[in-house]
Amino acid sequence: MIKNFEYAISLHKQKKYDEAYAIFLELSNNNDANAQEMVANMLFHGSGIKQNKELAYSWYEKAAENNNPEAQYWYGQYKLKNDYISEGLSLIASAAENNYPEALRCLGIYYSDGKYIDKDIDKSILLLQKALFEYGHKDALPNLLYTLNIKHNKLRIFFILLGNIFKMIFKEIRNKKKIK
């Protein structure tokens, strides 16, 4: 049997962590960014192996260097936590550019609050809308409402959201028609 990434994922879902980890590790050593991110996740959470957050972050770093958006986000958060603000923001921005929904939401929050970065409500709204309406990240909704409330009055927020909800519904209807 070919031991590839998809096979390792299926083992992981079956909670056969030792087998999955061995395959992920082998693929990681061959610069597979997705496998590197999985090794980092398993080490970070202690999924079937001994938890080792420092080693996890080194794998997140490798996966981030290989353009894995989830790893860019998590390694960026690690950098921010350790006061490497410029590096952390750059990594999170890269993850957002690669359309990682949590990075879009997080960067939107930073722009809304002026945390780590100059406050920019318009950028915040665009990022939060993208996270919510293009990628279905429901956790972005309260952040978007908060940010819209900063910029607009409450009645305008209602119509903006209503318009976006209709766009989402029509997009879903179009997608279902394409499938048939």
Image (cartoon, rainbow, N blue to C red):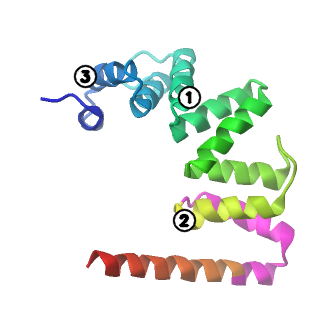
Circle 1: residue type: Glu
Q: Which label number is shown at residue 19?
A: 3
Q: Earlier in the sequence, mark 1 or mark 2?
A: 1
Mark 1–mark 2 Cα distance, whole angstroms, equals 26 Å
Q: Is residue 134 above or below residue 165?
A: above
Q: Earlier in the sequence, mark 3 or mark 2?
A: 3
The quarter of the image holding the N terminus is: top left
Start and end of the magenta stretch?
137-159
Few, some or many residues within 10 Å of mark 1 (<14, 14–19, 20+)? some
**Residue found at x 52% / y 76%:** 168
Describe the element under mark 2 as helix, strand or loop. helix
Position of residue 14 measured from the top left corner of the image (x, y, whole percent): 24, 36
**Residue found at x 47% / y 77%:** 171
For residue 25, side relative to residue 135 (left or right): left
Rendered image quadrant of residue 21: top left
Position of residue 167 measured from the top left corner of the image (x, y, whole percent): 55, 80
Mark 3–mark 2 Cα distance, whole angstroms, equals 35 Å
**Residue 152 magenta:** yes
Mark 3–mark 1 Cα distance, whole angstroms, equals 26 Å
Circle 3: residue type: Glu
> Does the residue at mark 3 contact the one at mark 2 (Cβ under 8 Å)?
no
Instruction: Tell which tag, 3 or 2, sits nearer the viewer.
Output: 2
The quarter of the image holding the C terminus is: bottom left
For residue 176, side relative to residue 180 (left or right): right
Which is nearer the eye, 24 or 16?
A: 24
According to the image, label 1 marks what residue? Answer: 65
The overriding secondary structure of the stretch rendered in magenta is: helix
Rendered image quadrant of residue 54: top right
Q: Is residue 8 above or below residue 137?
A: above
**Residue found at x 25% / y 28%:** 16
